[in-house]
C-alpha cells in the first residue's frame, strides 16, 4: 500500500509539472448567451445587463454581427462559435474558412475582444457525420488567423460533450470513447501545438439524474461532505468532493491516456435548471441556486481539481437567459439566471466572492418600513421576516443594540433591511405586501448597525435560501439530512470500490 501511495504521488508530481505554468492564471466565470427567447433583448440591452452584473466573459453560439458590435469597446472577452450547420463547408474548404474568419472576426477585432473560436458544438455526439472534417475545420480557421497575425490572441478549439468520456469514475481510469481516436488524437495534437485548450461541457445535473440516486444530490451540488465520506479514487488516492471535479479530472486522465499531459481545460458549459415538469423534480430554484453559487465560488477561488490543484478551470455558466422558445422538456427553457427583461430568476449566494453579479446601481440602499402603514400588516411582515424569512432577529431582543426604539416600525425596519441585504438587494425583495420601501438613507443609529451599512454586510445564513420571488418557506432543502446522506455516501463508497460510478 505504501508503495502504491508513493507511486501515486510520484505520478501526480510528474503530471503536475507541465500544467504548472497555467497555475498563475486566474480562472474566470463567463456566461453562455443562448438566443432562443420569444422576446430576445436587443444587443444593447444584453450588454447593459452584462455591465450591470459585472460579467466580463461571454460565449456566443454564433458570431452575430450586431451582438459583436454591441460588445465592442466594452473590454468583455468573447468566445464566438462556428455553428454546426456551417462546419461541413468550413472543414472541406480552406477558402470558406478564410471567408468566415474575414467576415466574422477580422471586421470586429480589436474593438471587440474576441479571445476564442469554438468550431462547432458537441460535434462528435451531435453531428457525427461531420467528425471526419472537424480537425480540418479547426486547422483552416487557425490558418486564417495566422495569416491575419491573430493566432496568438484568439484560440481555436471545439466544445465536447462529456459523454465522449467513458468509465469516468474513478477518474484515473477514464478514457475517450476509442471510436473517436482518429479524431481525438490529431485534435489534441492541434490543441497542444497551438497552445489552445480542451473545451468541455460539464453537466453534473445529467450525471446525477442518470445515476438514479447512486450519486447523492449533495455531491452533485458541491454541498460539503464529511471528509471521511468523500469519494476516493483508489488508484490515485485523490479525494473527490463534487461531481464537477471528477468529470474534469476524468478529461485530464483521458488526455493523458493518449499521452497529452499539458493541455488545459476550459468548461464551456455548466449549470442547473431552475424549473422542470413533474418528471424533473430536481430542477428547482433552490438546486439551481446552490449549484451555480457553489460552482462560481469554486471556480473563482482557483481551487482547480484534485489532479491539478490550483490550475485554472475557467467556466462558462449555462446560461445567461432562460430560453423560453426552446423546444423539449420544461427544464430546457429554464437554465438561465435572468429572464428576457434582465430580471434575475434567483439571486446567487456569493458572499465573500467579490462583486460579480452584484447590481451596482442598487449599491448602498436600505429597506425600511413605510411611514403611516397599517400596524397589523407591519407586525405580520415582521413576523414573516423573523420566521420563514429566516432573518436573524436577535439584534432586537431586550438588551441587544437594536431593541430601542421598541416599536413595531423600528423592529420591522431592521428585519426588512436584513432580509433585503440577504437577498443581495434583488428587485422585489423589499416589498412585504407594500409596507416596505427602499431608501438611500442609512437607518443605523448608535450601536445599532443595519445590514448593508458601513462595516456590516448582512446577516447571511449558512446554507441555501430561496429567492423571494418564489416566496416559498422551503427551508427543508437547506437542511443537511444527516441520516440520508450517510447512507447515500456509504452507497457511493461501495460503488467506488467496485468501480461502478458515473
Ligand atoms: C482582451 O482579452 C485579453 C485576454 O483576456 C486581455 O489580455 C486583453 O487585455 C484584452 N484587451 C482589451 C482591450 O480589453
Ligand atoms: C488553401 O490551401 C491551399 C493548398 O494548401 C493553399 O495553396 C491556399 O493558399 C490555401 N488558401 C487559403 C485561403 O488559405
Ligand atoms: C462510442 O461512440 C460510438 C460512436 O458514436 C457509439 O456508437 C458507442 O456507443 C460509444 N460507446 C459507448 C460505450 O458509449
Ligand atoms: C503513450 O506513450 C507510451 C509510452 O511512450 C506508449 O507505449 C503508448 O503507445 C502511447 N500511447 C499512445 C496512444 O500514443
Ligand atoms: C479555496 O481554495 C482553497 C485552497 O486554495 C481551499 O482550501 C478552499 O476549500 C477553497 N474554497 C472553495 C469554496 O472552493
Ligand atoms: C439593477 O438595478 C436597477 C435599478 O434599481 C433595476 O432597474 C434593474 O432591474 C436591476 N437589475 C437587476 C438585474 O437586478
Ligand atoms: C463583510 O464585512 C467584513 C467586515 O467589514 C469585511 O471584512 C468583508 O470583506 C465583507 N464581506 C463582503 C462580501 O463584503
Ligand atoms: C458599492 O459599495 C462599495 C462598498 O460600500 C463601494 O466600495 C463601491 O465603490 C460602491 N460602488 C458604487 C458604484 O457605488
Ligand atoms: C409573498 O407573496 C405574496 C403573493 O404571492 C406577495 O404579495 C408578497 O409580497 C410576497 N412576500 C414577499 C416577502 O416577497
Ligand atoms: C463609511 O465609513 C467611512 C469611514 O469609516 C466614512 O467616511 C464614510 O462616509 C462611510 N460611508 C457611508 C456610506 O456611511
Ligand atoms: C456558518 O458556517 C461556518 C462554517 O461551517 C461556521 O463557522 C459559522 O459559524 C456558520 N455561521 C452561522 C451564522 O451559522
Ligand atoms: C431524514 O431522513 C430520514 C430518513 O429518510 C427521515 O426519517 C427524517 O425525517 C429526515 N429528517 C429530516 C430532518 O428531514
Image: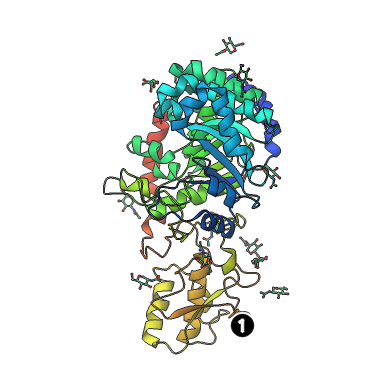
Residue drawn at x 44%, y 23% as measured from the top left: 130
Question: Picture coordinates of residue 242 (x, y %)?
Answer: 49, 40
- Residue 333 vs residue 147, the one in the foreground: 147
Residue 254 visible in the shown view:
no
Q: Quadrant of the N terminus?
A: top right
- Residue 388 vs residue 399, the one in the foreground: 388
The number of discs equals 1
Q: Residues within 10 Å of mark 1 (few under 14, many from 20)?
A: few
- Residue 250 vs residue 270, the one in the foreground: 270
Question: Picture coordinates of residue 400 (x, y %)?
Answer: 56, 79
Question: Picture coordinates of residue 284 (x, y %)?
Answer: 37, 52
- State the residue position of label 1: 445
Residue drawn at x 68%, y 32% as measured from the top left: 148
Left or right for 185, reference 386 = right
Vertical placement of residue 150 versus 347, above or below: above
Residue drawn at x 51%, y 28% as measured from the top left: 250
- Residue 242 vs residue 434, the one in the foreground: 434
Quadrant in the rendering for residue 468:
bottom left
Amino acid at each position: 500500500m505504501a508503495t502504491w501511495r508513493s507511486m501515486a504521488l510520484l505520478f501526480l508530481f510528474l503530471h503536475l509539472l507541465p500544467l504548472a505554468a497555467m497555475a498563475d492564471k486566474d480562472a474566470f466565470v463567463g456566461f453562455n448567451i443562448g438566443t432562443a427567447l420569444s422576446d430576445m433583448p436587443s444587443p444593447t440591452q444584453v450588454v447593459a445587463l452584462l455591465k450591470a452584473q459585472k460579467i466580463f466573459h461571454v460565449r456566443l453560439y454564433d458570431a452575430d454581427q450586431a451582438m459583436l458590435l454591441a460588445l465592442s469597446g466594452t473590454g468583455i472577452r468573447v468566445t464566438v462559435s462556428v455553428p454546426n450547420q456551417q462546419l461541413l463547408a468550413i472543414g472541406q474548404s480552406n477558402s470558406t474558412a478564410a471567408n468566415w474568419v474575414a467576415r466574422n472576426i477580422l471586421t470586429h477585432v480589436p474593438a471587440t475582444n474576441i479571445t476564442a473560436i469554438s468550431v462547432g458544438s458537441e460535434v462528435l455526439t451531435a453531428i457525427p457525420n461531420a467528425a471526419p472534417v472537424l480537425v480540418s475545420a479547426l486547422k483552416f480557421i487557425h490558418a486564417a488567423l495566422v495569416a491575419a497575425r491573430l493566432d496568438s490572441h484568439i484560440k481555436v478549439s471545439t466544445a465536447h460533450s462529456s459523454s465522449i468520456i467513458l468509465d469516468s469514475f474513478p477518474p484515473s481510469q477514464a478514457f475517450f470513447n476509442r471510436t473517436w481516436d482518429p479524431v481525438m488524437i490529431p485534435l489534441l495534437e492541434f490543441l497542444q501545438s497551438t497552445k489552445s485548450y480542451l473545451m468541455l461541457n460539464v453537466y453534473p445535473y445529467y450525471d446525477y439524474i442518470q445515476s438514479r440516486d447512486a450519486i447523492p444530490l449533495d455531491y452533485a451540488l458541491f454541498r460539503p461532505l464529511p471528509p471521511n465520506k468523500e469519494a476516493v479514487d483508489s488508484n490515485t488516492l485523490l479525494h473527490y468532493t463534487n461531481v464537477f471535479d471528477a468529470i474534469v479530472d476524468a478529461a485530464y486522465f483521458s488526455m493523458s491516456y493518449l499521452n497529452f499531459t499539458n493541455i488545459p481545460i476550459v468548461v464551456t458549459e455548466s449549470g442547473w435548471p431552475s424549473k422542470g415538469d413533474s418528471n424533473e423534480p430536481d430542477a428547482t430554484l433552490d438546486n439551481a441556486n446552490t449549484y451555480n453559487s457553489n460552482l462560481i465560488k469554486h471556480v473563482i477561488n482557483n481551487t482547480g481539481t484534485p489532479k491539478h490543484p490550483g490550475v485554472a478551470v475557467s467556466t462558462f455558466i449555462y446560461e445567461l437567459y432562460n430560453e423560453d422558445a426552446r423546444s423539449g422538456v420544461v427544464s430546457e427553457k429554464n437554465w438561465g439566471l435572468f429572464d428576457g427583461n434582465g430580471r434575475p430568476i434567483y439571486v446567487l449566494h456569493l458572499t465573500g466572492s467579490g462583486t460579480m453579479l452584484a447590481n451596482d446601481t442598487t449599491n448602498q440602499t436600505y429597506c425600511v418600513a413605510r411611514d403611516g402603514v397599517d400596524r397589523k400588516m407591519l407586525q405580520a411582515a415582521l413576523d414573516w421576516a423573523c420566521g420563514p424569512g429566516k432573518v436573524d432577529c436577535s439584534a432586537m431582543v431586550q438588551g441587544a443594540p437594536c431593541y430601542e426604539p421598541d416599536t413595531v416600525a423600528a423592529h420591522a425596519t431592521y428585519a426588512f433591511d436584513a432580509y433585503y441585504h440577504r437577498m443581495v438587494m434583488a428587485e422585489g425583495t423589499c416589498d412585504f405586501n407594500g409596507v416596505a420601501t427602499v431608501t438611500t438613507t442609512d437607518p443605523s443609529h448608535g450601536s445599532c448597525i443595519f445590514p448593508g451599512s458601513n462595516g456590516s454586510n448582512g446577516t447571511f445564513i449558512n446554507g441555501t435560501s430561496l429567492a423571494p420571488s418564489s416566496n416559498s418557506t422551503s427551508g427543508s432543502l437547506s437542511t443537511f439530512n444527516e441520516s440520508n446522506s450517510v447512507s447515500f455516501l456509504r452507497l457511493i463508497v461501495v460503488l467506488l470500490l467496485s468501480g461502478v460510478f458515473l
